[in-house]
Amino acid sequence: MEKCCSLFSTAYFPPVSYVAALLQSNSIVVEQYETFPKQTYRNRAVILTANGLLGLTVPVVRTNGNHTYTKDMAICYNENWTLKHWRAIESAYNSSPYFLYYKDEVEVILNKQHATLIDLNMDILTFVFKKLKVKKEVILSDDYISQIGEGTIDYRNHFSPKNKELLSLPEYDQVFEDRYGFQSDISILDLIFNLGPDSLGYLKEVMKIMK
């Protein structure tokens, strides 16, 4: 059953549960007028590599200091972080079943030199929905949403890498599972590269858990 309206933070190659929550929502609003918080999935993704879990962080610039809105968070390109992220993703998933099919589009996204974090993350959502073959409209907030209406689910601070109690999701085959065991609820990239067309079916199972 779809939820009427859901309010999300933006996210960089978000965790599986975030995407499952998106799919549950009939109306999706991404908050862009919040004061940007530190150490969240807004600019951080977690993938499974040969050395274990790895956090990939997009370097950002607070254009208005500590009061910068998420919509105004500029991406810093002083260091070639896009190449580092791509090499990490390639190394982690090169032997996954569907890496060959999706890698070019992911690399293109990383190489676009998006000006803002919101632009990058919206591009990622478009890619994710395309691979899942679902149609979802995502609306950016036009002001900070402080009053949550009836039937609206507020997920803005629900998905966080600081939360050590990760959602226990059904297992699927992961590249380095033999070394580290199944790693639950990491980046949607992990799911897509490992399950490919079966990713949507898996997400539907996750949606049942999250109800």
Image (cartoon, helix red, strand yellow):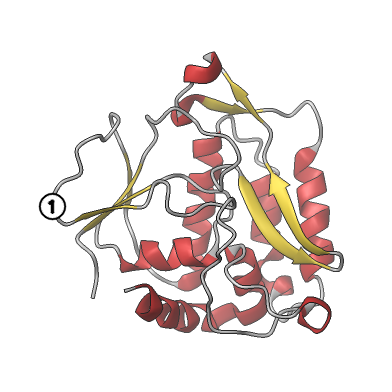
Q: Nearer the viewer, residue 201 or 45?
A: 45
Q: Nearer the viewer, residue 94 or 21?
A: 21
Whole-percent x and y of residue 32?
A: 39, 34
Whole-percent x and y of residue 189?
A: 63, 65
75 vs 66, left or right, is right
Q: Nearer the viewer, residue 194 or 66?
A: 66
Quadrant location of the C terminus in the rendered image: bottom left
Q: How many marks?
A: 1
Q: In which quarter of the image is residue 60?
A: top right
- List the single residue furthest toward the top: 64
Image: 30 above or below 127: above
Image: 41 above or below 76: below
165 vs 71, left or right, is right
Circle 1 Cα neighbour tier, 10 Å, few/some/many (<14 / 14–19 / ≥20) = few
**Label 1 is placed on what type of residue?**
Glu
Q: Residue at x 46, y 78 (%)?
A: 200
Any part of residue 129 in sight: no
- List the single residue furthest toward the front: 165
Quadrant location of the N terminus in the rendered image: bottom left
Image: 70 above or below 55: above
57 vs 13, left or right, is right
Residue at image mark 1: 150
Whole-percent x and y of residue 10?
A: 46, 45
Whole-percent x and y of residue 109?
A: 63, 49
Q: Residue at x 53, y 45 (%)?
A: 121
Any part of residue 136 in sight: yes
Q: What element carries label 1?
A: loop
